[in-house]
Image (spheres, rainbow, N blue to C red):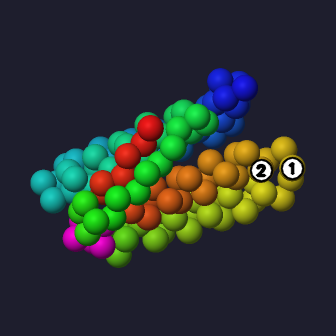
């Protein structure tokens, strides 16, 4: 079932989201300061390609300074965008599993440094 859900996800927006994360990560890679942040965007792009069947484990204490900088400049915007997408999917019963994936993305978007995607 998760394979079918991942295929639907990929077709109806997962591929586009992954490309956007990847392109923003490439832009951040152009600066030396942006390289660690770009790596986190690549982590999110990988998760967006195949979200069903994966778990996100946060570990804020591993990189508290990097996570704080991330939240101030990038994280809260990404998290709010993902939560809005989740709310739009929660409107229908069929969209609830997809909305739960957007909540998972919001969690990772808020504190990506030290987070593990399994």
The quadrant of the picture occupied by the C terminus is: top left
Residue 78, x across and y down, in percent: 49, 62
Relative placement, left or right, of 20 versus 52 is left
Q: Quadrant of residue 69?
A: bottom left
Residue 60, x across and y down, in percent: 33, 64
Spatial CA distance of label 1 from label 2 is 6 Å
Residue at horizontal 24%, vertical 62%? 63
Magenta segment, prevailing SS (helix, strand or loop): helix
Magenta span of residues = 65-69
Relative placement, left or right, of 70 versus 36 is right
- Label 1: how many Cα within 10 Å (few below 14, some 14–19, many 20+): few
Relative placement, left or right, of 65 versus 75 is left
* The one of 98 and 12 positioned closer to us in this rendering: 98
Q: Quadrant of residue 68?
A: bottom left
For label 1, the residue is: 93
* The one of 26 and 8 positioned closer to us in this rendering: 8
Relative placement, left or right, of 56 versus 51 is left
Q: Secondary structure at mark 1?
A: loop
Residue at horizontal 51%, vertical 44%? 55
| Residue 22 drawn above or below residue 102 | above
Q: Secondary structure at mark 2?
A: helix
* The one of 86 and 30 positioned closer to us in this rendering: 86
- The residue sitting at the left extreme is 32
The quadrant of the picture occupied by the N terminus is: top right
Q: Is residue 35 visible?
A: yes
Asked whether the beta carbons under mark 1 and mark 2 sit within 8 Å of each other, the answer is: yes
* Disc on res. 96: 2
Q: Is residue 27 visible?
A: no
Residue 73, x across and y down, in percent: 34, 71
- Label 2: how many Cα within 10 Å (few below 14, some 14–19, many 20+): some
Residue at horizontal 70%, vertical 46%? 98
């Amino acid at each position: 079932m998760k394979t079918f859900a991942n295929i639907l996800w990929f077709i109806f927006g997962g591929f586009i989201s992954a490309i956007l994360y990847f392109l923003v990560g490439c832009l951040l890679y152009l600066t030396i300061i942006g390289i660690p942040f770009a790596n986190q965007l690549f982590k999110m792009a990988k998760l967006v390609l195949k979200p069903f069947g994966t778990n996100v484990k946060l570990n804020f204490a591993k990189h508290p300074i990097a996570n704080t900088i991330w939240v101030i400049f990038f994280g809260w915007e990404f998290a709010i965008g993902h939560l809005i997408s989740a709310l739009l999917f929660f409107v229908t019963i069929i969209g609830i599993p997809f909305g739960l994936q957007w909540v998972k993305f919001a969690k990772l978007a808020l504190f990506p440094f030290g987070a593990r995607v399994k």
